[in-house]
Image (spheres, rainbow, N blue to C red):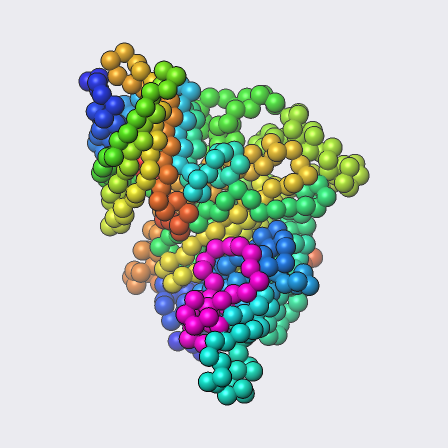
Amino acid sequence: MAAGEQLAMLVQPDRVHRSVYADPAIFELEMERLFGRAWLILGHDSQVKAPGDYFTTRMGREPVIVTRDEKQEIHVLINRCAHRGTMVCAEGRGNTERFICPYHGWSYDRTGALRAIPFGDGYAKSTLSDLRLKAAPRVANYRGFIFASLAPEGESLEAFLGAAKASLDDFVDRAPGGELEVAGGVFKHAYNGNWKLMLENHLDGAHPAWVHASSVAVARNAPEPGKPGEERYFDIAVRQMRQNGAPESVWENTGIWATPRGHGYMGDYHDDSRLVAGLGNPAFDEYRKALIRSKGEKEADRILRVTLWNTVLYPNCSFMSQFRQLRIVHPLAVDRSVVYTYSFRMPQAPDRLFRDTIAFSNVVNGTASWVLTDDLEVYERIQKGFTSGALEWAQIGRGFGRDVEEPGAVRGATGTSEVYIRAQMRAWLDYMTL
Amino acid sequence: MPATTVEQFLYHEARLLDTQRLEEWLALFTEDATYWVPLEQGQKDPAAGSSIIYDDRTLLELRVKQARHPRAHARLPLARTVHQVSNLSFREEGGEIEVHSTLVLVEYRAEKQRVWGALVEHRLRRAGEGYRIARKRVDLANSEAELDGIAILF
């Protein structure tokens, strides 16, 4: 398995072969051809504010360190000593001038250049001159979000993002002064399932009524949320869980778009403007004023009327601009994935908005939340199902043949169209057979 | 059965969880109770950062109700748990009793077994012959780790 024609047989316009999710050989190929080529989001400027700041993460399975140097440039370094292969930096974050390997003390600066080698005289000079912490060949930034690619050549980040830039714009524009910072801890939830299952779930308007039936039911019987300004802590939980039980017509009328690189985004399906501190809430009014001070009234009103819910940046990210949540999926094995969930604070907005972000994070994206736990259960059951050879194909044909071409994107005929999975699989095939 | 000592009360609480008598467990909590499983080590303020669980009494009740729902996929069946509570120390303060204990918990469901370790803090109020829980905080040793979904109560 590897030839392009064979891979192409696995992805058909309206169905996908189970091996795309379950075959370890295909997974290995994905790490090389997809995660080894595509732009991957790694994090946000605020995680490396000052020179010397760093954090560790992964690009596919590659452990990397993201650093900021004295010239304010950001570097993405493979976390592996050139000498004996040791990870030079313990996982986490911090500030340092040098990354010093714990094994023999080889030390590297913030750009990855090798600066000191104990007992270095033992090596021929020509051997050492090429050694360094290997750097991701391409690093780019879109409005504060850090991306990198392991491929030396390829399209620009902006070309890669295409129409999905609008969602990142929405994320940043909603912050007064355009200022955002990662804050409040990182959920890291893992599941025994393929990485693609998460990205295929996040734009799926047909699943909440079934997967989330239990949380919808208990929220419907919960006490009524408070009036604006009198909200209680549990209100966000109750509102969001209830909203997952929106009637079919609401889901069908929600917009869903997909781009050539497999990105996708959906319109907002919330009919409740007070899901977070919203209109009529004193904290929201204060926030709106801060946004007006920063952008002017007309622009502030335009920004607040943008309705985007989940956005998927293929192949490793999904985010909610309105709630300032961003998730990065790390593939660990064909049947094992881990998702890091970050919350963002708007430093120039009232603190109440960040409290809402945190409450939302706990309820929807938390490892023990009412909502996410049922998604994870289903991902694991899908993975188990795909080990069965009795049935070869999975269906992605809802709305097939009725997609609507729009500038830079294709729109699903209805909100529950599987147009976004078809786009993800087309992008998958492009990367895999390039 | 009213638990007459702090030790017996905590053992009783653990027993209710391990025998899945969740509604009786919920009834141990006061109306103004909070139940907190922090995400970060040493976390001070539940409003300033995410939590694995941070519930007021209303939300805690929703968890118990979800556990009974016929389509609660991650909770059907409920995980079997064994709570081992030990190393108790406590002191009385302002009419409430602050109890520190350690918890070792074995969880089993769907061919997955895992072991949790936690430092636990209870704040108890006297109620008749027994106690009620005004606050419970569970600091998991591995709260910051990469964790599979959690559908149990600690």
- Is residue A408 visible in this depiction of the protein? yes
Q: Residue A354 appears at what percent x and percent y?
A: 58, 37
| Residue lying farthest to the top in this orientation | B128
The N terminus of chain A lies in quadrant: bottom left
Total numbered circles: 0
Residue at 48%, 35% in the rendered image: B44
**Residue A101 on the magenta span:** yes
Q: Residue A371 appears at what percent x and percent y?
A: 43, 39
Looking at the picture, tell me which residue is in the foreground, B13 or B41.
B41
Q: Residue A90 appears at what percent x and percent y?
A: 45, 60
Looking at the picture, tell me which residue is in the foreground, A287 or A413.
A287
Residue A207 vs residue A279: left or right? Answer: left
Residue at 25%, 27% in the rendered image: B10
Residue A299 vs residue A430: left or right? Answer: right
Say if A107 sits above or below A126 in the image.
above
Q: Residue B90 appears at what percent x and percent y?
A: 30, 26
The C terminus of chain A lies in quadrant: bottom right
Residue at 30%, 14% in the rendered image: B127
When asked about the image quadrant of residue A110, the answer is: bottom right
Residue at 42%, 30% in the rendered image: B55
Looking at the picture, tell me which residue is in the foreground, A279 or A359.
A359
When asked about the image quadrant of residue A281, the answer is: top right
Q: Could you tell me what secondary structure mostly forms the magenta stretch?
A: loop
Residue stretch rendered in magenta on the structure: A78-106
Residue B77 vs residue B51: left or right? Answer: left
- Is residue A374 visible in this depiction of the protein? no
